[in-house]
Structure formats: C-alpha cells, structure tokens
Amino acid sequence: MSETPPKAQRKSAIEEAQLVNVVLRYFKLAGVAVGVWLSGYLNFSPSWLLVGLVLYVWKERQGKRKKLQIEIRQDTARDEQKAILARVEDLPSWVHFPEVERAEWFNKILDQIWPFIGDYVKDLLINSIQPKIQASHAHMASFVFTRIDLGDIPPRIGGVKVYTKNVRRDEIYMDLDIIYSSDCDLMVKLKGMNMGIKDLQVRGTMRVILKPLLSRMPLFGGLSVFFLNNPSIDFNLKGLADAFDLPGLREMVEDIIAEQIANIMVLPNRIAVPMIEELNLSLLKYPPPEGVLRIYMIEARNLVSADVAFVGKGKSDPYAVLKFGPEKFKTKVINNTVNPQWNEVFETIIDCKDAQVIDLEIRDEDPGSKDDKIGTAAIDISSSASQGTLDTWLPLENVKKGDVHLKLVWMYLANDLMVLEKTLKQVGASSELASCVLMVNLDSAKDLPRMKKQIAEPSPFVVLSLGPKSFETEEKPNTDSPVWEKPFRFLVHNPHIQKLDIQIFDKKNPKESLGDLTIPLKSLLSAPDMTLDQDFALKNSGLDSKINMRLCLRILTPENNPAWRSEGAILNTNSSSVDPPADPKKEGTSSPDATKKPQPQTGPAKAANNGVDPTIKKVEVTQINAAKPEGQVIPPASNTSPSTVTSTEVRQRKTKSSPAPAESDARGAYGRGRIQLTFRYSSQRQKLVVVVHKCLNLLPCDSDNLADPYVKMYLLPDKSSSGKRKTVVVKNNLNPVFDETFEFSLKQEEIADRDLELTIRNDTSFFSSNVKVMGVVTIDLSKMDVSKAATDWFDLHPEDSDDAEKPISVESDV
C-alpha cells in the first residue's frame, strides 16, 4: 500500500487546523450571542454590555499589536538580514553602536546546542524557579510547571562589546545584547487552574566577566554572569489566563517573573562559576560595589495635562518613579499641577557604573484606575560618576513636552577612618543621607537549638535589620547547621550609634526565636580594614550556637583614591605560581608550612596587628577564610541536603586536618597505621558527635596489596544496634578518606562510663580468606575532654592485643 506523500499530509494538516479555528470562532460568537440574550432576558443593565464590549475591543487591539511584534522578532531570529531590510525597527545593537560587533559564529553554535540547553533550563525552572515562585506569595504556594517546551528558536546575540579601557590586565569584560524571541510553550497549574505562557520575549544586556586571567589552562580562574538592568519581558497567556488577560493580572505575573530573574542574576545578584580550585569565590561572587549615587529629585515643569477639566486647563497629579535593577524609589504625589516640586533625595548602591542606567518615569495618579505615564527619561550613571556632581534639566521622552530637574552626586567608598568625621559633618542632621555602606555576607550558622516539644530539626531563616531597612533570607529546611551564602547591603547614617540586629527564626514556628545577635557598628571602626570575618556567638540560643558572617564597613566620600578600591587577592595563593592540587595519596608527606594552622583572632583583638603590612595582611586573611571559617571544626552532618553539600565543597568547608605524623611514625606504634578522629559533645542536643576523617598506612589485606577498608564503631559497654555505626567502604585504598559525621544520643553524666571501640575492617566476601580486621582502637571517653571539639590521631592495634588497653594519640589539634 502506497504511503501518503508529505505534501498531501501537510495540506491535510492545514485544512484540519483551519476547520478547528472555524469551529472555535463559531462557538466564541455563539457564546457572545447567548450572553447578550441572557442579559436582556434577566433584565441586566446595558452598561454591563458596554463594559464587556470595551474589554473585548481592548483585548483584540492588544492581541493584534503583540502578534505583530512577535512575528517581527521571530522573523529576525530566523533571518536577520531579510527582516532588517523589510523593517527598520527593533534593530540589534551592532547597527546603532560602532563599538559593538556581530557574533554570528556564536549564534550558529547556540543554534546547534539549543536542544541540550532546553533540558538544562527545564531542570532549572523546576528545581530553582518553581520553589521561589511558590514562596513569593501566599497565593502562589500551589504553583507548578506542567509543561516546559522552549521551542525551536534559540536566543540570539545581537551584538558583543568587549571593553579594552578602564579594565585591569588580568580580566575581560564583555556585554552581550541578548534577544530572545521564542516560540516556547510553558504551562503551569495554580490552584487547580491550568494557565500558560507562549511567545516569550526577553531582551537585555548581559555582562560576562572572566577573571583572573592565568598563564595555564583554562586561562581564566572564574566566570561571572549577570544582567546590568532588569531585562524587558513580554509574553502571551494561554488557557484560563488568556480569558482573564487584563491589566491587573498581567502586571502581577510580569512583576513576579521580573522579580525572580532579578533575585538570580540582576545586579547585585550574579551567577559565579569557579574554574580552578584555589579561586576565592566570595570575591568573584560578591565583589565590593563601585560607589553610591545620590539622586536629588527637585522638580518638573511644563508637564502634560493628564486630567481633563471642564472649566479652564486640565492639571495632573504627578509623581516620579526611579527604577534601577531590583531597586525602586517613588516620590510623593503633588496634586493639581503641571510644575511639581518634590525636593526629595534617594540613594542607591552602584555595583557597576558602566553601561547601567536609571529609568525615570513621571506618572499621573488616578485613584481607582491605572496611573497614566506622562513622560520618561534615562539617567546614564557612568557620565554622572565621571563628573562627580551633575545638576541638569532632562527633557522627557515619549511625550509632547515636559522637563525634569535632577541633581546627581557620586560618592566613592573609602576604608580610611579619617574620612568619617568629614563625611558626618557633610551629612549633618539629615536623616535621609547616609555616611557609610555596610556589606554583610551571611555565610552559615551551626548548632541551632530545637524548639520546645519539637523532635525534628528546625527550618531556620534569618532577619537582618538596620534602621528602617530589613532583609529576610530563604529558609533552609530541616537542619541545625544551615548554609545561606547571601550578601546584603545597608546604607548607614551614623556608625557610632547604629547597630545591626540579627534574629533567627524557625519557619515551622516563626513566632519564637532560635537566637539573636546585636552588633554595634562602632566595633567595625576599630577592626583591621573595618572588616570582621568570624563566628559570632548567638544570644538566647544554644550553648554552642554560632553564626558566621563577614561584615565590611565603607565610608562615603566625594573624593577618589585608587587605593580604596583594593579588593584583596582573588586567588588563595599567588596566581603566577599556583601548583596543581596535591595528590590525596601523598597527603601524609605534605610540608609543615602547608598544614600550619593560623591562630584565631576575633573582634577587637585583631587591632593588635596594625603594624603588619595591610596588603600582606589582607591576602593572609583571604587565605585563612577560604581554607576554613574560624571555629568550623566539624564538617556538616551526613543528613545535609545535596544543595548544601555543593555549596560546602565550593567554599571548602571541610575540616582542616591536623598535621599528619612524621614519615618515620606513619605506621603507628603497632605497625598497623593510624586513624584521625574528632570528638565533641553537644550539651544542647545531648549528643556525642564523632567525625571519622581518614586513615594512614593501613595493612594490605588483598592479593593486590590493597584493601577495601571501612570503619565500624560501638559505644561500649552496650553493643546493641542502637550504639553501632558504620562508614562507607573505600575501595582499593590504604589511605582512605571518610570525612563522615556520626552522632550518639548520650547524657553528659553517662560519658564517664562509656568507651568507644572502632574497628577498621576489610570488606570481603563471606568465603574469602583475606584478612578481615585491619586494626582496632578503644577510646576511654572519661579521659577525653569532649566539652570542646578536639581532633587527634590514634594508633591502631591488633584485635587480640593485650598491651593496647590505652590508645596512643599524637598531634592533637584543638
């Protein structure tokens, strides 16, 4: 039987689609006719028909306009040259700006890998974006993606600009003009209703930074990506949402999408990817801002009349809205005037002044309806920063007439305490102006208490407050040692009197606090470089509860000093002489300098180092913090979520091991090797915490002179299953690294009567003749100071040895 030719198949499909459209249009018109008949039959007021007619006409006009824009953008995505010749609007950036270059080679690559990117984006939407949308509002809790299809049209790079001036030799700055005119199909479900988004349009400028450049592969240490400003977003709705495609609903959806994109990758948020192990990721992901911009909204003149008056000329009720990234400022409303005077000042932290703009809108307030837009303007930040102070009238765009009077003042960031008094005098008694910027990098907390009558671990989140400004982190479910790694910035009026308030709550019971902390900002004034990076003990919490943060204070000044822009070392060692990572098998023979533990310093005690060269001191602090946060002795518990484990590896949170024994003693007193352990007792949780780090120079047990070791431990004298713990098996290794944490429920008064027996065993089959027990160590807990974390090496002895009643420990690291 002959197959139907493809041409006939396409014709049949087209005819079927046309028939479906005719049927749908018939039922729509029939529904309208039935609605008109019902309104007359039920004696409804004719005004309801007029309202429906207005909404229908508005929706049809908006639909046609959006459809035309989508067709133009999709044509440009398919054949840019043909679309440009046919229409001279919506041109890519390389047409307008000579310093922007085309990147067709990259667009061809992107077209090839687009199907694989689709799989990645699907995973990102489900695992990252969907939970954030659910947590954004109480009504969005049931939000889920039911269909994700990115379509066949990939994004395009409209132009690439590579900066060659005002950049350092060891970094590359690129701006990409992202144009995404898609034929995607996304369906979501909210409270049992199916809604969808199609024909998604996104356009914005994305910055890519490669730094630091290296003389070895991969030639750069890290990559950071972010949008300079909020990208413009447009889309069409599907399903039930299409029937209610009204201004209020559309704006709510657009705001939610824009907010989630801003929280991920619009400044100051960015995506940072380390390419080498020794990179200081915190400086790549959270670099210090470039300055602060003060915007004085003074007045406007000759605005258009948005309100119609029956007697005399019409007036407006104008107010101004300033948008910059996720920031948004609004002036007060001046009623019945076209020449308003606001005389208000706003301050915003600028992370990157080049290629960023502040969008200004003048609106007319209309209570009960959407406010009219009566003029826009764009403020170039780089030109304002270069001039220092700019006082000017800007003509309003997209309107027949109108001007706005602005004054812009650029403030640099200084770490010189001598500048503070001068800045405080300039600020004076004005509570609207700031004298400093406080940067808070909230890292983690540990040993948080459980709430009363609660067995499960808490789901903590943090609220940070300074003056009228407050921030709230996301919750970390079911852990007493959460990791947030989030930056926050506060504008400070007077650091001599203001304080940073921190409170930790449990999402399961947000009315009761898990701990709090108050830090006077004046303590930062006496700290080296006005920076504190340490563990802070929490109040009204557990005995061992702490929170790890980095606090950095910078003073605002109109003066510029290049020395104030020092960011410290982005590499944990000298980038010109970085050695490859050490072989784990050779870890026991590392040099003493490589394992030397720095003495911890906290708070004002650091001020004693003022005689040290500031540059050297900054590099040393960076290395210490990247290697191990102060007080981080015990690694995260084994029940840590996968996302937390990933963050842990990036920040190198694992315990910095105590120095390995000398080579001559590496096999231990009994010739069977050694094991490294950490002990600590949590009085708040009434648990003994034991960390099994690693073993050195175990006996070979198999025919290939290797072994498959694991550690089994018992809490004596009871050998029941409740007191038994076991590590994973490390295959074919005589120097296994476990780094596993175990907990034993034990009252403090019971510790003196308990011993901990550890047996290092070789994993063999039941019928194997290979050695099964490689070594044993029994530890008398009554002789161990478990009130604080202690790390020790213990010699392994034979299983039936009589002269090994007491374990031999070496190289204690407390």
Image: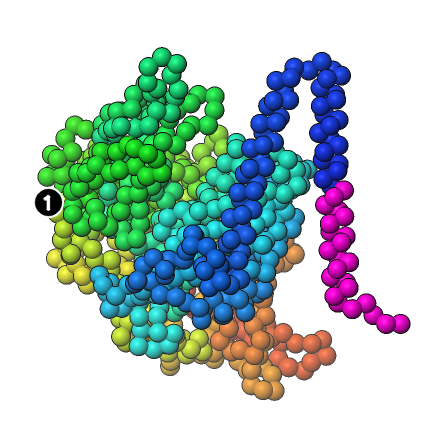
Does the rendering let one see residue 367? Answer: yes
Q: Is residue 716 above or below residue 131?
A: below
Q: Is residue 791 above or below residue 65?
A: below
Look at 16% across and 33% down and name the residue there: 427
Question: In this rendering, would 96 be left or right of 741?
Answer: left
In depth, the one of 293 and 661 nearer the eye is 293
Q: Is residue 261 above or below residue 593?
A: above
Highlighted range, magenta = 1-23
Q: Main secondary structure of the magenta part?
A: helix
Look at 53% across and 58% down and name the residue there: 75
Look at 28% across and 43% down and name the residue there: 379
Residue 792, position in %: x, y? 41, 64
| SS at mark 1 in the image | helix
Residue 551, position in %: x, y? 29, 47
Going by the numbered disc 1, the residue's amino acid type is Met
Quadrant assignment, res 410: top left
Quadrant assignment, res 573: bottom left
Does the rendering let one see residue 155? Answer: no
Look at 45% across and 42% down and name the residue there: 259
Where is mark 1, residue-wise? 418
In depth, the one of 562 and 254 nearer the eye is 254
Residue 592, position in %: x, y? 30, 73
Which quadrant: the N terminus? bottom right
